[in-house]
């Protein structure tokens, strides 16, 4: 679970609602400064909602109130922010207990069912947050793969009979640079120099016979990375990739896409 846990408020000795205002305001100010409006809403919305319902607490159905606040927790958790979801869970359980559950205007949980209620809010919030995060990751993965396909199609649309080989190579370089997030890429009409890192069609990079662990160490930054371009068994050139300004950690499928793009130069 990401983010630092929020501590419990100091014991409330004054049973009036405004007694908790100083620590609430201070915590709200801290949250607003560090994390923005989403987490501020997660913190304060349950407090205002519970306070608004407090005058009618003797006549309202607690089950309906619980469902209403559960919707609030779900709405915040659906943003995919784990910390905001947890804040909404804790804030909702705390303010329901403070305003709507006896003993009123205290943060004591006097009944076992209220403890279960607080735990249920936490579980619902965390479950919805994880589902939202998974959905966002899947959507990002689809968008990323769609970007790969678009880039390859853009290169394939370049007619070798209508465009020069240089134009095709430049288009391929642009797409490789975009996919890998590297500094630059250029095409060299010669075989790679001995000893330089080589990117293979398996998505692996090797240098001097040793496989580079890109997931752990990132792309090499001290030398150019070569993607050989072959026509049959003959190496007719290579794409020289530069990733020197910072360490980058492309995924294996991104490296494979770069090789697939480079292969299109052999068709030019």
Image (cartoon, rainbow, N blue to C red):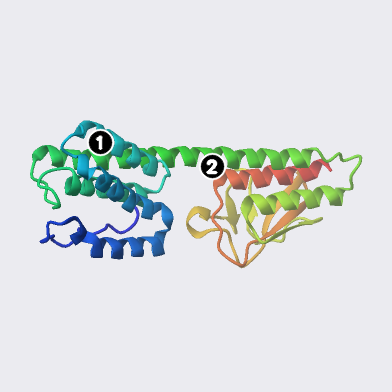
Work out which residue is located at the far right of the displayed protein and give it: 162
Residue 86 shows in the view = no
Give percent across and percent down for residue 242. 67, 62
Q: Nearer the viewer, mark 2 or mark 1?
A: 1
Q: Which mark is residue 200?
A: none
The residue at the point 39 percent across, 61 percent down is 32
Left or right of 169 in this view: 206: left
Q: Secondary structure at mark 1?
A: helix
Res 148 → quadrant: top right
153 or 256: which is nearer to us? Answer: 153
- Residue 2 image offset from top left, x and y in percent: 35, 53
83 w.r.t. 247: above or below: above
- Residue 50 percent coordinates (x, y): 25, 45
Dot 2 alpha-carbon crowd within 10 angstroms: few under 14, some 14 to 19, many 20 or more: few
- Which residue is tagged 2? 140
How far separated are the C-alphas under marks 2 and 1? 36 Å
Q: Nearer the viewer, residue 77 or 265?
A: 77
Mark 2 residue element: helix
Please state if 200 lies on the left or on the right of 139 as rendered: right
State the residue at coordinates (30%, 59%): 4
- The percent coordinates of residue 130 (x first, y second) are 37, 41
Residue at the location (61% across, 48% down)? 255
- Please name whichever residue, 263 or 65, is drawn nearer the observer in this view of the structure: 65
Number of callouts in the render?
Answer: 2
Quadrant of the image for the C terminus?
Answer: top right
Quick one: 82 or 197, which is closer to the camera? 82
Q: Give the residue drawn at x 64%, y 54%.
A: 198
Residue marked by disc 1:
65
Mark sitting earlier along the chain (2/1): 1
> With 17 as the anchor, is 30 left or right in this view?
right
In which image quadrant can residue 121 be found? top left
Place residue 241 in its image quadrant. Answer: bottom right
């Amino acid at each position: 679970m990401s983010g630092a846990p929020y501590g419990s408020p100091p014991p409330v000795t004054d049973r009036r609602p405004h007694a908790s205002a100083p620590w609430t305001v201070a915590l709200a100010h801290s949250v607003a400064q560090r994390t923005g409006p989403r987490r501020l809403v997660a913190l304060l919305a349950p407090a205002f909602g519970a306070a608004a319902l407090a005058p009618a607490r003797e006549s309202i159905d607690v089950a309906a109130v619980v469902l209403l606040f559960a919707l609030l927790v779900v709405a915040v958790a659906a943003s995919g922010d784990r910390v905001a979801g947890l804040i909404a869970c804790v804030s909702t359980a705390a303010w329901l207990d403070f305003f709507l559950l006896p003993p009123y205007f205290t943060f004591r949980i006097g009944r076992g069912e209220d403890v279960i209620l607080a735990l249920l809010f936490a579980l619902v919030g965390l479950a919805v947050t994880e589902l939202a995060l998974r959905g966002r990751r899947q959507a990002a993965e689809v968008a990323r793969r769609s970007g790969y396909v678009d880039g390859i199609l853009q290169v394939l649309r370049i007619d070798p009979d209508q465009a020069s080989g240089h134009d095709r190579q430049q288009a391929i370089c642009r797409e490789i640079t975009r996919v890998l997030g590297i500094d630059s890429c250029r095409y060299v009409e010669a075989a790679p120099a001995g000893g330089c890192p080589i990117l293979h069609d398996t998505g692996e990079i090797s240098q001097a016979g040793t496989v580079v662990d890109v997931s752990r160490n990132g792309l090499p930054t001290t030398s150019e990375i070569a993607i050989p371009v072959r026509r049959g068994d003959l190496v007719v050139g290579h794409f020289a990739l530069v990733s020197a300004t910072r360490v980058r950690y492309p995924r294996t499928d991104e490296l494979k896409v770069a090789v697939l793009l480079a292969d299109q130069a052999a068709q030019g």
